[in-house]
Image (cartoon, rainbow, N blue to C red):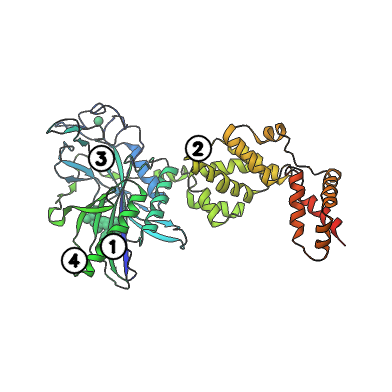
Amino acid sequence: MSQDSRYETVIGLEIHTQLRTRSKIFCGCPNQFGSAPNTQICPVCAAFPGVLPVLNREVLNMAIKTGLALHGQIRLYNEFARKNYFYPDLPAGYQISQFELPIVEQGELMIEPEGSPRKRIGITRIHMEVDAGKNLHEGIQGASWVDLNRTGTPLLEIVTEPDLRSAAETGAFLKKLRSIVRYLEVCDGNMEEGSFRCDANVSVRRWGATQYGTRAEIKNLNSIRNVMRAIEFETDRQIDRIENGEKVIQETRLWDANQNLTRPMRGKEEAHDYRYFPEPDLPPVQLDPARIEAIRATMPELPDDKFARFQKDYALSDYDAGVLTASREMANYYEIALRASPADPKSVANWVTGELLGRLNKEGLEITQSPVQAESLGALTAMIHNNVISGKIAKSVFAHMFEHGGTPQQIVAEQGLSQVTDQGAIEAEVDKILAAHPEKIAQYRAGKNQLLGFFVGEIMKATRGKANPGVVNELLKNKLAP
Ligand code: ADP
Ligand code: ZN
Ligand code: MG
């Protein structure tokens, strides 16, 4: 199957981000993953009769932070709502969420999909809600377990406008959003473990059509790669249906990563009627604008601002600035390296995005696990800048640091790699090489200019790459002049 260019894909996302608070949203139980079943619960978690929820103020702060980072309107008066449904992992019989008056509305996120211009994606709303427990179906014959540890985990649901138009844009959006929640330290952004979960609403329409097509909502997407694959599959599936004269049905579908397809889960007729109403056990949230300003003042520099500053202060390309601000850790690494080599921001950027990231990717390591410290990479760049070593030798020093540790100063000293800039020493080598190739000198003087490279190469070989290339070139040109 292939994408049909007569159709356009339309995508809107609903993202559940699990907040990294110490305690749960409505009680004092620890907000912790991986404990033995039903050990992180209390009567509020288990919804005993008569218990009352109390809102964790940190959840509110994180919701405001996220709203500000996404340039949303913070609703000073917002309220919780009860979303009623039955499921064994939901002992209360309802989920506390927000409905008509969510805490954030009308935000936006700018994305930079590879090879396309920057694009604005609207954020419809962000609301606070509580997670349910988990049903476990393994390890017992003909029965299921219920683990309520996850009950009470605070979530932010972030809903986008149907502004995305391709799998690539959606991938760029999710990467950017994940980077922001990580910058803010509100969520660890781990899709595999389910702390950053995305449902994708997908529809197709003929190019130029003004109405949206009927959408399917796809669940069970546990990586950005899977979200992108599911969108591609779903686009083709819907186009095939339309081309065959069938209708796209509004339904919820599940992504099957093993078989690379989506399958129906439930249709519209099975859709719940949640009977939302304002949550009677919690007072509406009334925010003081001063609180919002206080939170704004504590916000870290976010990727877009960092991107602009890196371009302005360090004259970096879009590409370099994009890679270097993709995560807070990456940006920190770069700026620490730069302190050791302040005169050369472009070279430091090249070393980080090229040699270092290339090697880290190959070894499957994160920037935080780099065996080469930022200070050392900066020192290495400075040594090239100051003509202590050539770029070529720097690569071998880098490889040595990556594999065996050490600082570039140490390695260069121990292995005697310092560049030879002494005019007399280099001249002796130049004379030796020239004496060995009288025929090539004649050819050069007869107009075969490219032989200069040959001579340079021979001299570098003879000096094990340590001769300063500038001095070598200078000497050669003088001596070869007719
Ligand atoms: P619901 O609450 O039933 O899921 P919403 O109107 O809140 O419905 O929409 C949820 C998501 O679906 C939003 O992200 C929105 O952008 C997206 N969406 C709505 N209509 C379409 C469509 N025709 N094609 C793709 N996505 C859509
Ligand atoms: Zn509890
Ligand atoms: Mg939905």
46 over 218 or under it: above or below: above
Q: Is residue 45 left or right of residue 155?
A: left
Q: Earlier in the sequence, mark 3 or mark 1?
A: 3
**Residue positioned 80% across, 58% down in the render:** 440
Cα distance between the residues tagged 2 and 3: 31 Å
Q: Earlier in the sequence, mark 1 or mark 2?
A: 1
Q: Earlier in the sequence, mark 4 or mark 1?
A: 1
Q: Is residue 164 left or right of residue 437?
A: left
Residue type for callout 4: Lys
* Res 439 → quadrant: bottom right
Q: Which residue is mark 1?
A: 236
Pinpoint residue 290: horizontal percent, then vertical percent: 41, 45
Residue type for callout 3: Asp
Q: Which residue is mark 3?
A: 131
62 over 255 or under it: above or below: above
Pinpoint residue 214: horizontal percent, then vertical percent: 22, 63
Residue type for callout 1: Asp
Q: Which structural element holds mark 2?
A: helix
Q: Which structural element holds mark 3?
A: loop
Q: Earlier in the sequence, mark 4 or mark 2?
A: 4
Q: Quadrant of the N terminus?
A: bottom left
Please identify, in this view, whether the residue under mark 3 or under mark 4 is nearer the observer.
Answer: 4
